[in-house]
Image (cartoon, rainbow, N blue to C red):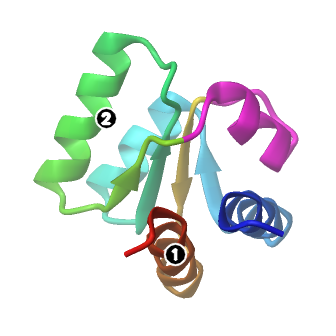
Amino acid sequence: MNDKQATLNFLGLARRAQKIVTGQDIVLAAIRKNQVNFLFIASDTGASTKKKFTDKANYYHVPMFSGYTKDELSSAIGQKRSIIGVADTGMAKKIITLIHNQKGE
């Protein structure tokens, strides 16, 4: 299994463990409350949405990744979403590790 698929599988596990936040307004509120430890933004998200969430994540120091499409993220969690926040600290650290492995860092 490659690192990209491992990351998406782990995101699905986080969904089943109820450790993610989905939906634009809900994720935005969770970022403001410092409840999001990692943010996925779909690469094919609209420009204004991408800018809004990128700016919020940078302001609140939330690490983020936009290397997956809406379809990839949606199939990983079983819901049609383009913005996904990971609320659990341990799971966010594991996802960051998997993404760094995927990038080859």
Q: Amino acid at mark 2?
A: Phe
Q: Residue visible at 86% across and 65% down?
A: 16
Magenta-drawn stretch contains 56: no
Q: Position of residue 61 (x, y in %)?
A: 19, 63
- Residue pointed to by mark 2: 53
Label 1 sits on a secondary structure element that is helix
- Tell me if 37 is positioned left or right of 9 in this view: left
Q: Residue visible at 49% across and 80% down?
A: 97
Closer to the camera, 70 or 55? 70
- Tell me if 102 is positioned left or right of 81 in this view: left
Q: Residue visible at 42% across and 12% down?
A: 46
Query: In which image quadrant can residue 10 be found?
Result: bottom right
Q: Residue visible at 58% across and 39% down?
A: 68
- Is any part of residue 36 visible from this angle? no
Quadrant of image for the N terminus: bottom right
Question: Callout 2: few (<14), some (14-19), or many (20+) C-alpha neighbours within 10 Å?
Answer: many
Please report the bounds of the magenta region as a residue range: 68-81
Circle 1 or circle 2, nearest the eye? 1
Question: Callout 1: few (<14), some (14-19), or many (20+) C-alpha neighbours within 10 Å?
Answer: some
- Residue pointed to by mark 1: 101
Q: Position of residue 27 (x, y in %)?
A: 47, 43
Closer to the camera, 39 or 17? 39
- Is any part of residue 45 visible from this angle? yes
Closer to the camera, 1 or 28? 1
